[in-house]
Amino acid sequence: MAEPPPDKPHVLVSDFDGTMTRYDFYRLVIATLLPPNTPDYWSEYCAGRLTHFETLRRYFAAIRATEAEVLAVVDRLELDPQLPAAVQALRAAGWEVVVTSAGCSWYIERVLRAAGVSIEVHANPGRFVEGQGLLLEWPTDSPYFSPQLGIDKAAVVRRYLAEGRTVAFAGDGYPDIDAARLVPASGRFARDHLAEALTRAQLPFTPFRVWSDIARVLLQSPL
Ligand SMILES: [Mg+2]
């Protein structure tokens, strides 16, 4: 049964790429938008020679497509079509949704706006310049600044926990694990690489297929 909304909303902190959407923007970029001679920055990242931020910055700056071509890729991210309704249902039940992403607000805000969704987004700023690609910028004004990821997702979770709020977290990637560790097991949602990492760390979580599954669980069994 639905409970009355709390005074201070509960917070679902969520990753964007691969969590709210089916596909990751950077993966589509690598697969479709880069010149064939682009270095394998991902291997450099995996070997610990590049930060996550620097890896994305280099890939995005290697884009030599037109803005229209890049926007066509943004259109292929496949935001969960049930997400707008799920955000509304969560809001009505006292849940605020906050996006934390190591990606770029240039495409995240576009995708959310196109779906008519207005939620807080913490991501790296950026702008598209034809011939120079998508220029990823440091979120130097953000209280959650991280030199590795740009945005420190765990810091966002910590802030709401410090306010005494009920916090849930959803993600799909390795960079999500620090944030996922901080929330109670019943509010920990994962798939793909994050699910693997949590399983290895023996931390319980609820798996999800699409983002709106998470809303369904939170609405059915309040934390
Ligand atoms: Mg992700």
Image: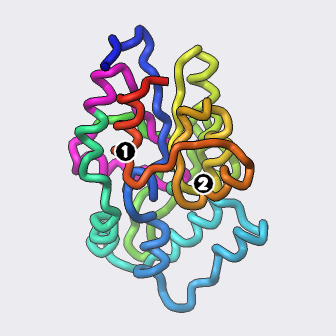
Number of numbered discs overlaid on the protein picture: 2
Q: Residue at x 49, y 62 (%)?
A: 135
Q: Disc 1 vs disc 2: which is toward the camera?
A: 1
Q: Residue at x 37, y 37 (%)?
A: 215
Compute the Cα span from label 1 to label 2: 16 Å
Which callout, 1 or 2, points at the residue further toward the start of the chain? 2
Within 10 Å of disc 1 (Cα), the crowding (few <14, some 14-19, many 20+) is some
Q: Residue at x 31, y 19 (%)?
A: 2
Q: Could you tell me residue 57's position as x and y percent?
A: 57, 64
Tag of residue 194: 2
Q: Residue at x 48, y 87 (%)?
A: 35
Q: Quadrant of residue 186?
A: top right
Q: Is residue 145 visible?
A: no
Point out the stretch of residues depicted in magenta. Answer: 88-117
103 and 6: which is toward the camera: 6
Tag of residue 68: none
132 and 220: which is toward the camera: 220
Within 10 Å of disc 2 (Cα), the crowding (few <14, some 14-19, many 20+) is many
* Element type at mark 1: helix
Residue topped by disc 1: 213
Question: Label 1 sits on what residue type?
Answer: Asp
Q: Quadrant of residue 183?
A: top right
